[in-house]
Image (cartoon, grey):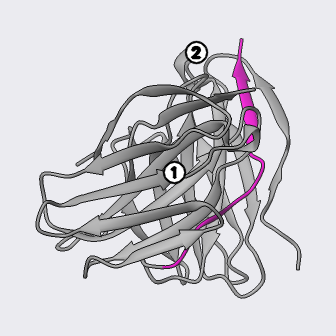
């Protein structure tokens, strides 16, 4: 069974640009979660999608947005990039119920110059 | 509402035991435990639902005290491979959001 895949592995942008990160969940999983992990810090919840709908979002500005496609893959878009957006962005998928385990991808390392 | 984890960091010798606590000020529906090794993605360990059940995973087990809104992760006879940061994640009884705690860094030395 293929795990959660994220692309690209690394992404280098400059301030003010826009970034798109992609996530393919484990087959059969309908929920996708996005987290931001700054260097050496914890996992900050960004967004939760399930069955194509945004179920919840964390305490991030509106320039962080995303969507989930009919095949349950997901995109995270970050507009007007700022230096503090530099972080590892992790995607996780689960079977949808909130009491199901989340399986993480290896992340996208976003660096803002 | 981010859960509180304690301790923030712990250093052990191989074979020693450790306990990591996770607590919330609000009623919890479930508690998840994950371990993240340096440079790797978090890996799921176990989920505990309300009811005070205890679960185990090799020599790692956990309990959930719903009266205290607290979960404890027990690491018995620690191995070098147990090193990493342990995160608890909580789902509130009356909320949908899943929130990770700040993490507990565990270092096991030979």
SS label for mark 2: helix
Q: Nearer the viewer, residue A27 or A73?
A: A27
Residue pictured at 81% horizontal, 31% vertical: A11
Report x, y in % for residue B40.
76, 41
Residue pictured at 11% horizontal, 68% vertical: B67
Q: Which quadrant of the figure contains the N terminus of chain A?
A: bottom right
Q: How many marks?
A: 2
**Side of A7 relative to B80 (left or right):** right
Corner quadrant of residue A13: top right
Q: Nearer the viewer, residue A72 or A79?
A: A72
Q: Is B18 drawn above or below residue B61 in the view shown?
A: above
Q: Which residue is mark 2?
A: A83
Chain at tag 2: A
Q: Nearer the viewer, residue A113 or B96?
A: B96
Magenta residues? Answer: A100-113
**Side of A104 relative to B60 (left or right):** right
Q: Is B9 drawn above or below residue A105 in the view shown?
A: above
Q: Which residue is mark 1?
A: A65
Labels 2 and 1 positioned on one and the same chain = yes
Q: Find residue B102 and name its label.
A: none
**Side of B102 relative to B94 (left or right):** right
3D distance between C-alphas at marks 2 and 1: 18 Å
Residue pictured at 72% horizontal, 22% vertical: A111
Q: Nearer the viewer, residue A44 or B71?
A: B71
Is A91 inside the magenta-drawn segment? no
Chain at tag 1: A
Report x, y in % for residue A63.
47, 39
């Amino acid at each position: 069974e293929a795990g959660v895949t994220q692309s690209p592995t690394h992404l280098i942008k400059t301030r003010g640009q826009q970034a798109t990160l992609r996530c393919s969940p484990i087959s059969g999983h309908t929920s996708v979660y996005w987290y931001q992990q700054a260097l050496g810090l914890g996992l900050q919840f960004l967004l939760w999608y399930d069955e194509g709908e945004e179920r919840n979002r964390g305490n991030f500005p509106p320039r962080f947005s995303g969507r989930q496609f009919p095949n349950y893959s997901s995109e995270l878009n970050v507009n007007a990039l700022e230096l503090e957006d530099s972080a590892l962005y992790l995607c996780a998928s689960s079977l949808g119920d909130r009491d199901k385990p989340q399986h993480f991808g290896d992340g996208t390392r976003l660096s803002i110059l | 509402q981010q859960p509180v984890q304690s301790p923030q960091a712990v250093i052990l010798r191989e074979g020693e035991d450790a306990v990591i606590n996770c607590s919330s000020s609000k009623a919890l529906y479930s508690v998840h435990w994950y371990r993240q090794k340096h440079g790797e993605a978090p890996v799921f360990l176990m989920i505990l639902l309300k009811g005070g059940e205890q679960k185990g995973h090799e020599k790692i087990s956990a309990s959930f005290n719903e009266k205290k809104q607290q979960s404890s992760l027990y690491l018995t006879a620690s191995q070098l491979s147990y090193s990493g940061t342990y995160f608890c994640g909580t789902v509130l009884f009356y909320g949908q959001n899943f929130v990770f705690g700040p993490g507990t860094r565990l270092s096991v030395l030979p």
